[in-house]
Image (tube, rainbow, N blue to C red):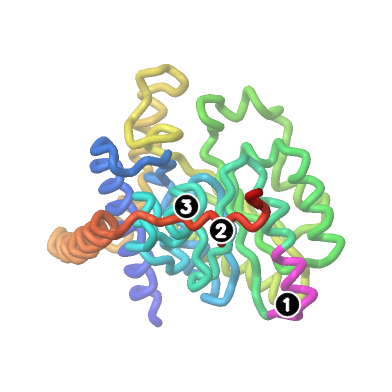
C-alpha cells in the first residue's frame, strides 16, 4: 500500500469513528441507550494509528472509553450499538453496555471501567500468550489517571521481568473526570521515565497526529516482535465532550473555554485533512458512505430483541430448595 493510500485510510477511519460517536451523542437523549457512554471525540488518532499498526491477530484490552479502540481494531458497529442499546445481538449479548465490550472475532477481550483495572488483565493475557507460545501482542489502552494506581508499577515490573509481548498505550488527555493532571501528579513525575526505569522500551508522541502515532506504534510493535520485551508509549491528546455523556461541559469550570478552543483547533481530523488536502467533494463522499453504515447499524440495534434470562442455566451457583 502506498503512503498516500495509507494516509487516506487513516483519515477515513478517524472520520468514521467521529461520525459514529457524534451520532451516539445526538441520539443519546432519546433514552433508549440505558448505560453511560464515554466518548472519544477528539482522541481518534491514537486509536486509529495504533490499531492500524497492529495485526488482526493481536489482542485488545481497553478502559471505560473503549468505542474508538474497538472500532479501530475491526469491531462490528452493529454489534457495538446493539450492546449500548442493551440488545441480545450486542457484542456482549446486551449485558455489558458501553463500558464492557467483548468481541472475540476482533480479538477484543474486554474493556474494564475501573480505572487501572484493565492493566493487570492485559498483563495476564500477555503472560498467557507467552506460555502458549502464541504469535500475538496484547494492546492495552489506558488514561494517564490509571498510572496513579499501584497496579501500574506492579504490572510494568511483571511485564518486564517475564519479557511479555504487551504494548502499554497511555492516552494522556490531561483530565481524570474533572481533575487536571497537575493536581493529581507531581510536575516532576515522568510516566515514560517510570516505564523506562522498569525496563520497557519507551516513546512519547503527539496523539493528535495520526501518522506520528502510527509510526511510533510500528516501532514499538517491531521492538516487541523482535523479542526485546514490553513497550510503553504515551500520547498527548484531548477529549472534546464531557467525561461521561454526550454533552459539552466547559461551563462547569474545570477547564477554560480558551483551553478547549485551543485543543479543538488541533483536531486530529482537521490536521490530517489539511495534510492530504482532502477536497470537500471527497469528504462528502466519505461522509455519505459512513452515514449509510451508521443508519443501518442503528436500525439493527433498535430493532433487535432484548436478551432473555434463564435462571436455571445462567446461575449455576443458585439452588432452590
Pointer 3: residues within 10 angstroms few (<14), some, or many (20+)?
A: some
Q: Position of residue 198 (x, y in %)?
A: 82, 52
- Marker disc for residue 125: none
Q: Is residue 126 magenta?
A: yes
- Marker disc for residue 95: 3
- Evaluate if marks 3 and 2 touch, with contact meaning CB atoms under 8 Å apart: no
Name the residue rendered at 26%, 48% in the picture: 23
Q: Work out whether mark 1 precedes mark 3 in sequence or the reverse, and give the earlier one.
A: 3
Q: Work out whether mark 1 precedes mark 2 in sequence or the reverse, and give the earlier one.
A: 1
Q: Position of residue 234 (x, y in %)?
A: 61, 50
Part of the protein shown in magenta: 125-134
Q: CA distance from mark 1 to mark 3?
A: 39 Å
Q: Mark 1, mark 2: which one is toward the viewer?
A: 2
* Residue 216 in view in this figure: no
Residue toward you, 10 or 320:
320
Q: Relative to 104, say whether 14 is above or below.
A: above
Q: Which residue is mark 1?
A: 226
Left or right of 83: which side holds 196?
right
Name the residue rendered at 63%, 50% in the picture: 320
Looking at this view, name the residue that lies furthest to the front: 321
Name the residue rendered at 28%, 46% in the picture: 22
Q: Position of residue 21 (x, y in %)?
A: 33, 49
Looking at this view, name the residue that lies furthest to the right: 161
Q: Is residue 226 magenta?
A: no
Q: Which residue is mark 2?
A: 312
- Evaluate if marks 1 and 2 touch, with contact meaning CB atoms under 8 Å apart: no
Pointer 1: residues within 10 angstroms few (<14), some, or many (20+)?
A: few
Q: Position of residue 109 (x, y in %)?
A: 58, 63
Q: Work out whether mark 3 precedes mark 2 in sequence or the reverse, and give the earlier one.
A: 3
Amino acid at each position: 500500500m502506498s503512503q498516500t493510500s495509507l494516509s487516506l485510510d487513516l483519515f477515513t477511519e478517524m472520520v468514521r469513528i467521529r461520525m459514529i460517536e457524534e451520532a451516539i451523542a445526538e441520539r443519546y437523549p432519546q433514552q433508549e441507550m440505558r448505560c453511560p457512554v464515554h466518548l472519544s471525540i477528539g482522541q481518534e488518532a491514537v486509536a486509529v494509528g495504533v490499531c492500524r499498526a497492529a495485526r488482526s491477530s493481536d489482542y485488545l484490552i481497553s478502559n471505560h472509553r473503549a468505542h474508538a479502540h474497538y472500532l479501530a481494531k475491526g469491531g462490528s458497529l452493529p454489534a457495538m450499538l446493539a450492546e449500548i442499546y442493551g440488545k441480545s445481538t450486542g457484542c456482549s449479548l446486551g449485558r455489558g453496555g458501553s463500558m464492557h465490550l467483548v468481541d472475540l472475532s476482533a480479538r477484543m477481550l474486554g474493556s474494564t471501567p475501573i480505572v487501572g483495572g484493565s492493566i493487570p488483565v492485559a498483563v495476564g493475557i500477555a503472560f498467557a500468550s507467552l506460555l502458549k507460545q502464541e504469535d500475538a501482542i496484547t494492546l492495552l489502552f489506558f488514561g494517564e489517571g490509571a498510572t496513579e494506581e499501584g497496579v501500574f508499577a506492579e504490572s510494568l515490573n511483571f511485564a518486564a521481568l517475564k519479557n511479555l509481548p504487551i504494548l502499554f498505550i497511555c492516552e494522556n488527555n490531561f483530565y481524570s473526570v474533572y481533575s487536571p493532571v497537575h493536581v493529581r501528579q507531581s510536575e516532576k513525575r515522568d510516566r515514560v521515565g517510570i516505564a523506562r526505569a522498569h525496563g520497557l522500551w519507551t516513546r512519547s508522541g503527539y496523539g493528535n497526529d495520526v501518522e506520528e502515532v502510527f509510526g511510533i506504534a510500528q516501532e514499538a510493535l517491531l521492538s516487541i516482535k523482535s523479542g526485546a520485551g514490553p513497550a510503553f508509549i504515551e500520547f498527548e491528546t484531548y477529549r472534546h465532550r464531557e467525561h461521561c455523556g454526550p454533552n459539552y461541559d466547559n461551563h462547569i469550570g474545570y477547564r477554560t473555554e480558551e483551553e478547549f478552543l485551543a485543543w479543538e483547533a488541533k483536531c486530529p481530523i482537521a490536521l490530517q485533512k489539511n495534510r492530504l488536502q482532502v477536497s470537500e467533494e471527497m469528504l462528502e463522499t466519505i461522509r455519505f458512505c459512513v452515514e449509510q453504515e451508521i443508519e443501518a447499524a442503528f436500525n439493527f440495534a433498535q430493532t433487535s430483541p432484548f436478551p432473555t434470562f434463564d435462571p436455571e442455566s445462567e446461575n449455576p451457583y443458585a439452588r432452590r430448595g
